[in-house]
Amino acid sequence: MEAKRPRLGSAFLLAQVGAHAAQRFTERIAELDLTPAQVGLLRLVAMRPGQSQQTLAKQLGTPATRLVPLVDGLEKRGLIERRRNAEDRRLYAVELSEDGQALMGRVAQAGAAHERTMTAVLTDDERDVLHGLLSRIAEDQGLTPGVHPGYARGRLS
Amino acid sequence: MEAKRPRLGSAFLLAQVGAHAAQRFTERIAELDLTPAQVGLLRLVAMRPGQSQQTLAKQLGTPATRLVPLVDGLEKRGLIERRRNAEDRRLYAVELSEDGQALMGRVAQAGAAHERTMTAVLTDDERDVLHGLLSRIAEDQGLTPGVHPGYARGRLS
DNA sequence: TATTGTTATACTCTATAACTATA
DNA sequence: TATAGTTATAGAGTATAACAATA
């Protein structure tokens, strides 16, 4: 029973390969006892330390209520710290702890290994070309660098 | 407060742009009162008509129990038909109705429009290059043509 | 006994809204 | 009164397992 093979557009391929990439990365960071949501938050906190939870939520496009248990878990593991803002004591200033910074180093290693396996079939030149095309699409589509759109909808990967 | 801008790898860009592409496509087909899960099933049924629900579930990588309400909804709308297999009456033979085939034509139109907007920033030559690179990665990673990996984990996007 | 399809239950996850503390 | 953070509730969606029909 042979299947008809419809022409698959680049948009579908992007969604398909992108979901696969997210899935594989999820498996890798699971070895560090981290979920994609946690890594996304850690990455944002690493990029911009000291922000309030409301600000973080807005940047991730997620309701603030989702951040509370996320921050709770990472704080209990000693990866991030909530410090009270002296000027406005309603606000927290969320920062990475030393352990958190060390863990982000391991996340970066996992990301590098992930990068290699995902693009293993390409030559170095082709990798550069792909990166350039994807960067231009990301910018054209108004995507925030380093922020996965999945946060806005609860679906991570 | 300027942010450090870490080097974003192609793997992350793939996940980010891919999730965005899936999100935008979801919005487009919502105008046809369809979800990504429904479109994925319709596409598979269109490619290989007459298969049983168990076979469909295996190809989508999803538990068979998820297929039941999915098929139910599409059958009630008259888009697909469940016919009993005469040789083995435990099995259904799932097929597209005429309305279902017509709707898939509109889905294809939505997909084409989606394709144009997603790659609007690229030249024709660049579109071909991107399609070639993504196709090779998809094959190298063992992805099934036309099947979005999200089915296997419940997350569609 | 094995397999297809279905139903039922429990579980996870999410958002909405109400609540507390601070401004 | 307005805002940051938290908690509580209810809802949607999922998988696991039990069930009925057919082989």
Image: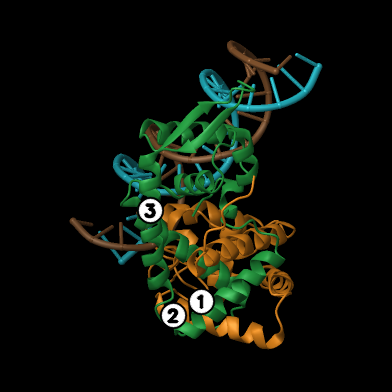
Chain colours: A orange, B green, C cyan, D brown
Give the residue drawn at x 59%, y 64%.
A17
> In whole angstroms, how far apart are the C-alphas of marks 1 and 2?
20 Å
What's under tag 2, amino acid-wise?
A: Glu
> In whole angstroms, how far apart are the C-alphas of marks 3 and 1?
46 Å
**Camera-nearest label, 1 or 2:** 2
- Answer with mark 1 or mark 2, whichever residue precedes in sequence: 1
B135 on left or right of C3: left
Disc 3: host chain: B
The answer to which of B103 and C13 lies nearer the viewer is B103
Same subunit: marks 3 and 2: no
User: What is the number of the mark on residue A48?
Assistant: 1
Q: Quadrant of residue C19?
A: top left
User: What is the number of the mark on residue A139?
Assistant: 2
Residue of label 3? B105
The answer to which of B3 and D7 lies nearer the viewer is B3
Answer whether residue B48 is visible to the viewer in this image. yes
Disc 2: host chain: A
What's under tag 1, amino acid-wise?
A: Arg
Q: Are marks 3 and 2 in contact (CB under 8 Å)?
A: no
Disc 1: host chain: A
The answer to which of C14 and D15 lies nearer the viewer is D15
Mark 3: few, some, or many residues within 10 Å (few <14, many ≥20)?
few
Residue A34 screen position, x and y as percent:
66, 58
Residue D3 screen position, x and y as percent:
31, 63
Give the residue drawn at x 61%, y 69%.
B135
